[in-house]
Amino acid sequence: MAQPVKISVVEDDPIFARILKVRLTGLGYEVVSQFASGEEAIRCLPDAWPHLMIMDILIEGGLDGVETSREIMDRFRIPTVFVSGATDERTIDRVKTVPGAEFVSKPFSDDDLRIAIRLALAKYRFVHQLRSQEARLREVLEQFPGGIVATDAQGIITFANAGARALLGIDCPDGASIHLREVLRLTDATGAQVLEDPFEKVQRDGRAWWFPPNTVHNIDDHVKRPISGNAGPLLDEDGRPAGMVLTLFPLGHEQRFLRFRPGGTF
């Protein structure tokens, strides 16, 4: 027999909190804790560890229901069903900022409550699966032997794996709002011919581009690295340009920079 869904209630009206507990129990749910404020809920929640929160938006304390729910999602990954008499546009917009949250307007029927709970749990499972898949994909990309870079439609780096960060000198995976042209400077082997920015070329031509032979990435005026790679467009669901993905491979000694004197060979 499946265990009942465990629910914590955050409601500062004790009469409504008791009524809500009776209604939830009648629907087959187990109310494991009740709190009058967001601060109390956050502090005591690990003792109960519910599957779902039922949260009033206008509650006592320094945090309202939306702020409390965001904090609970960030810390504990527990979804929320909001119950509130406030249905103004601003309130609804704030509810939308909480991942997977559902909203039930007071007064509500048992069916309204049951459906909202089931939807919130289903959305949470879906979001959790997406996050797990994204984490696995990032792990695979981090272990890729070459560099992989993704940009947005403006050429700002949105992802760079470990290989790319080492090649380009980027400290964090999201690129810290760095434009690709700031960290990738390509020339021929002599340094005399500057190659076109891969992002600009892919955006203009709309197709994949491979680095020509003897391409060099100029780390600075005294450090260069022979490199191979390719760049291709990223498209959104409507087929419009949404950025670029770049693959980089160091040539020769993969983990060593090649140093040279200006005007010399390497």
Image (tube, rainbow, N blue to C red):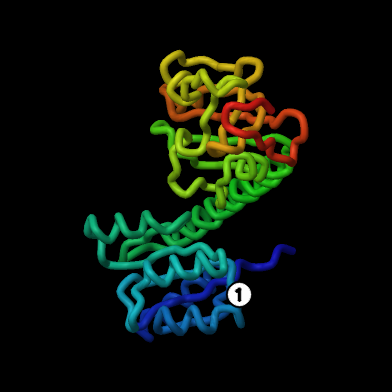
* Quarter of the N terminus within the rendering: bottom right
**Residue at the (47%, 49%) spot, across then down:** 176
Taking the view exactly as shown, the residue that stands out farthest to the right is: 253
**Residue at the (66%, 24%) spot, across then down:** 228
Q: Which residue is mark 1?
A: 49
22 sits to left or right of 3: left
Using the image, determine if residue 177 lies above or below residue 53: above
Give amino acid for label 1: Trp
In this orientation, does residue 238 appear?
A: no
* Quarter of the C terminus within the rendering: top right
Using the image, determine if residue 225 lies above or below residue 83: above
Percent x, y of residue 68: 42, 72
Taking the view exactly as shown, the residue that stands out farthest to the left is: 88
Foreground pick, 39 / 6:
39
In this orientation, does residue 95 appear?
A: yes
Counting every numbered tag in the picture gives 1
Residue 164, picture quadrant: top right
Using the image, determine if residue 194 lies above or below residue 123: above
Percent x, y of residue 94: 32, 59
Percent x, y of residue 78: 54, 65
Report helix, strand or loop for mark 1: loop
**Residue at the (41%, 31%) spot, across then down:** 153
Foreground pick, 77 / 196:
196
183 sits to left or right of 90: right
58 sits to left or right of 70: left
Foreground pick, 120 / 112:
120
Using the image, determine if residue 142 lies above or below residue 41: above
Percent x, y of residue 89: 23, 55
**Residue at the (56%, 17%) spot, across then down:** 209
Answer few, some or many: residues within 10 Å of disc 1's Cα (few below 14, many 20 plus, some between 14 and 19): some
